[in-house]
Image: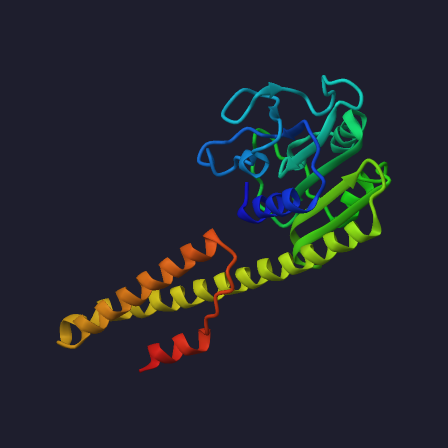
């Protein structure tokens, strides 16, 4: 699971009228993501069932999305987060979700487009926004959006409402998502700038290592570069943990290095 989609689920838990029980399909917390990919804390006061086709951390029930062994209209909310690309017949899975959702139920789903192949255990699909719109056609009301470049987004977001919702709630949802997307895009841009500066620092460090033995001043200059690199790493880590609006000037850092 990626940080951006986890934050998307958190936002939905705060905005939408979530009903019980909640079923998360694809809840297995794969190696290296134990705890991080747990979405339960966002719904701590509600009945939550983690479902997957295999046993493991985060799994409460073994269920097959192609043929979900649950009664008609028995589920309040369904989460399919970064899972549909691993489902061989996604249209059949969405039909099954539609079947088991209560009349006021909600389906929240995300998947990838511009993303590497990752087999858990198989990786079948990449989705466009239009593909999500097609999958959600059976829902009276749906919302589809994306993260990343419009021509090649890295993430597709979708919400299906089993019953119609008010235009007021739909408008609030769109407005909040727009603000959230701006923060996500700003964070990504800052991270890219940080990476660029860190790469420049690495090149400079390599040059200093070649020549520092020939000049007594190179040693303390090299130490200064190490300190700067450490602080950049700390800032990058901070950016990965939250979406606060950190302002950083790539131009200023480059000019510091030019002295």
Image spot of residue 259 (x, y percent): 31, 82
Residue 230's image quarter?
A: bottom left
In the rendered view, tell whether residue 236 sits above or below residue 2: below
Could you tell me which residue is drawn at 64 percent across and 45 percent down?
Answer: 14
Q: Quadrant of residue 236?
A: bottom left
In the rendered structure, the answer to whether residue 9 lies left or right of residue 230 reads right
> Taking 175 as reference, is 121 left or right?
left
180 or 150: nearer the viewer: 180
Query: Can you name the residue that lies furthest to the bottom here?
Result: 259
Asked if residue 206 can be seen in this view, the reply is: no
> Residue 165 versus residue 257: which sits nearer the camera?
165
Residue occupying image coordinates x 14% and y 71%: 213
What residue occupies the far front of the structure in this picture?
45
In the rendered view, tell whether residue 24 sits above or below residue 116. Answer: above
Q: How is the image coloured?
A: rainbow
Residue under the point 42% across and 56% down: 238
Query: Residue 162: image x %, image y %?
Result: 82, 35
* 186 horizontally vs 175: left or right: left
Q: Residue 205 occupies which quadrant of the picture?
A: bottom left
Image quarter (top left, top right, bottom left or bottom right) of the N terminus: top right
- Residue 83: give x, y in percent of width and height: 63, 35
Q: Observer-nearest residue: 102 or 78?
A: 102
- Please indicate whether residue 96 sits to the left or right of residue 26 in the image: right
Question: Across the whole image, how many numbered discs are drawn on residues?
Answer: 0
Say whether residue 101 is visible. yes
Where is residue 206? Give x, y as percent: 28, 66
Q: Is residue 56 above or below residue 44?
A: above
């Amino acid at each position: 699971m990626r940080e951006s989609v986890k934050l998307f689920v958190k936002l939905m838990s705060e905005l939408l009228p979530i009903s019980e029980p909640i079923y998360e399909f694809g809840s297995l917390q794969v190696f290296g993501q134990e705890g991080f990919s747990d979405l339960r804390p966002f719904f701590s006061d509600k009945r939550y069932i983690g479902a997957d086709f295999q046993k493991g951390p985060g799994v409460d029930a073994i269920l097959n999305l192609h043929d979900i062994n649950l009664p008609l209209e028995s589920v309040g909310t369904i989460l399919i987060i970064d899972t549909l690309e691993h489902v061989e017949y996604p249209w059949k899975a969405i039909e099954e979700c539609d079947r088991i959702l209560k009349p006021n139920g909600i389906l929240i789903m995300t998947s990838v487009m511009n993303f590497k192949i990752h087999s858990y255990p198989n990786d079948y699909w990449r989705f466009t926004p239009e593909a999500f719109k097609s999958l959600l056609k059976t829902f009276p009301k749906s919302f589809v959006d994306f993260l990343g470049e419009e021509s090649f987004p890295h993430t597709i977001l979708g919400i299906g409402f089993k019953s119609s919702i008010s235009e007021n709630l739909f408008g609030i949802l769109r407005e909040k998502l727009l603000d959230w997307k701006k923060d996500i895009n700003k964070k990504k841009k800052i991270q890219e700038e940080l990476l660029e500066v860190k790469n420049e620092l690495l090149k400079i460090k390599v040059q200093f290592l070649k020549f520092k033995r020939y000049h007594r001043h190179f040693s303390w200059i090299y130490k200064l570069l190490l300190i700067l690199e450490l602080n950049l790493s700390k800032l990058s880590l901070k950016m990965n943990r939250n979406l606060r609006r950190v302002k950083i000037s790539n131009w200023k850092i480059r000019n510091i290095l030019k002295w």
